[in-house]
Amino acid sequence: MSFYVQTQIMQFAQALPLECGASLASYELAYETYGQLNESKSNAVLICHALNASHHVAGQYRGQNNSEGWWSNMIGPGKPVDTNRFFVIGVNNLGSCFGSTGPVHINPATQKPYGADFPVVTVEDWVDAQERLVTRLGIEKLLAVMGGSLGGMQVLAWSMRYPKRVRHAIVIASAPNLTAENIAFNEVARRAIVTDPDFHGGHYYEHGVVPKRGLRIARMIGHITYLSDDVMNTRFGRQLRRVAGNLESDSLAEQNYLYSTQEVEFQIESYLRHQGDKFAEYFDANTYLLITRALDYFDPAKAFEGRLSQAMACIEAKFLVISFTTDWRFSPSRSQELVKALLDNHRQVSYVNIDAPHGHDAFLLEDPQYLSVVRSYFKHL
Amino acid sequence: MSQKRIEILGELIPLGSRVLDLGCGDGAFLEYLQNNRQCFGYGIELNDANVASCFERGVNVLQLNLEEGLKLFEDQSFDVVLQIDTLQHLKNAETMLKETARVGKMGVITFPNFAHWPNRLSVLKGRMPVTKHLPFEWYDTPNIRVATFNDFQDLAEKNKLHVSKAFGLVGERTIAVWANLLASTAVFTLTSTSLT
């Protein structure tokens, strides 16, 4: 069931102080809403997006085919988060490239695009910006804040920074911070971008180029980590590209290797290149750097000498934590750290570990058990 | 579990307790404890359908595998830890009994009593019992630990667990004497000796 939506922009004239010490003098946030806010303003659900997503969570744009929101299987009329009952808000984060103030926008101080001069924003900064939007929409208390991966970190930050304003926190495929391995993947992606000759220290807009090579590689490595070994083998295995394209004619001749180091030989290579190419067409390189850094920096336990339970003592929200058995980028044990900290604080928490083959990507996919868990949870709200 | 059984077992749980229900099933008992005995708690349950049912009852549920122990839970962090008809499904039944005593100030354990007289009769006839309470054949039963009322008392003693109450249930009646023979379900409440 599709429905049409429109992006809205909210302007903020009051400066936003950032964790890095700088502040954004003024900024705007792109957002969308679905469903109706009830009279008591008690049915609002905020969706926080992950690395490469946006405020366009559900529905589609009139006159644009294939413009469904990134979480359309989860959110909409009759969906697990049912917009016939709930007022759902999607908001684009600062530093992004989908409408909210970010590196591609004009820096009022220089009258040129921010580029690499856009301040380093953190998960907490995003949440502070979102809080102003929610307040402006007239919502004192959110029924739920929900997000996967980096979105889940925002949910966690919401519940700690604004404990009185969140009734339910739904944290999916997330973690209380990144592991060294996770930071390492981000660093490889960033090095790919900044060492691209077209990067120009982040001011590539002025040069009329985009560091696409770097972006492609960043996306390729990211994509590998979002899938599981099993799902990659099932989908691609050792299939050669020529054979995969034409199953009818898999004659012996066509199964021979090309014996080339440069050409696309295996189907997985073709798939990754395609993903990289697609991504480099629409995503901004500076945004990629900023968002991966926000991931790296997030660590609410840091101020408590690593003691997560202490950091989370201020939480009042009721939690639903969801992980996926084959997710190795944000593994179930990381979700269980959150559960433990909530248990230590005698907070209300439910935890579901979904048996899904798809790795980290599972949180965006159509898994019946996953969707039904969210549906039953929201049914009770 | 019948409503009457829920009430009988509910009586064992002190008002306002913090409860951890190991193998909480559809969450009916926890829901009862929340609504009728002012308890606060969490269930642990592996089965997907049961997890969904807990959500719909508004019961906190954690989808964890009990065979992996209770490592998320601190020592003596719950007033009561429940094992209602759970023990017989666990490979590591003894470990979980120790874990129950570690995490809970009190434990409540129930399981089907294999020494209930109809079961004895069945074995005397040369057949494994298939009854209302043990409705499975030997080759497909999820009850991988079959024990008797008396067996459990020995295990509790071996682990230096203090049995504070021990009785049986048959249907909706409690059995105080000769429970090993007359009860289809064994019920024990435990407190670790370190506390007594």
Image (cartoon, coloured by chain):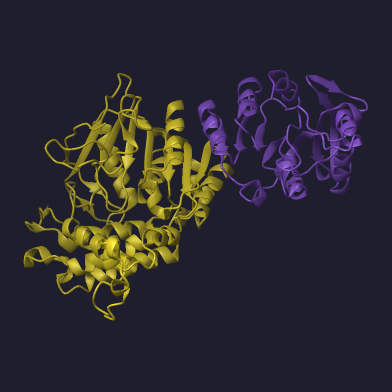
Chain colours: A yellow, B purple
Q: Is residue A318 left or right of residue B33?
A: left
Give residue A4's position: percent from left, percent from top.
18, 32
- Which residue is nearer to you in this view: B119 or B51? B119
Q: Is residue B111 left or right of residue A270?
A: right
Quadrant including the C terminus of chain A: top left
Give residue A267's position: percent from left, percent from top.
31, 65
Relative to A327, does residue A207 appear above or below in the rendering? below
Q: How many marks?
A: 0
- Which residue is nearer to you in this view: A353 or A169? A353
Relative to A16, does residue B42 appear above or below in the rendering? above
Give residue A79's position: percent from left, percent from top.
35, 32
- Which residue is nearer to you in this view: A207 or A40? A207
Q: Residue at x 73, y 50 (%)?
A: B92
Q: Is residue A56 left or right of residue B66?
A: left
Q: Is residue A129 left or right of residue A156?
A: left
Q: Look at the image and tell me whether residue A315 can be seen.
A: no
Q: Residue at x 69, y 21 (%)?
A: B2
Q: Look at the image and tell me whether residue A275 can be seen.
A: yes
Q: Quadrant of residue A329?
A: bottom left
Quadrant including the N terminus of chain A: top left
Give residue A291's position: percent from left, percent from top.
29, 56
Q: Quadrant of residue A360?
A: bottom left
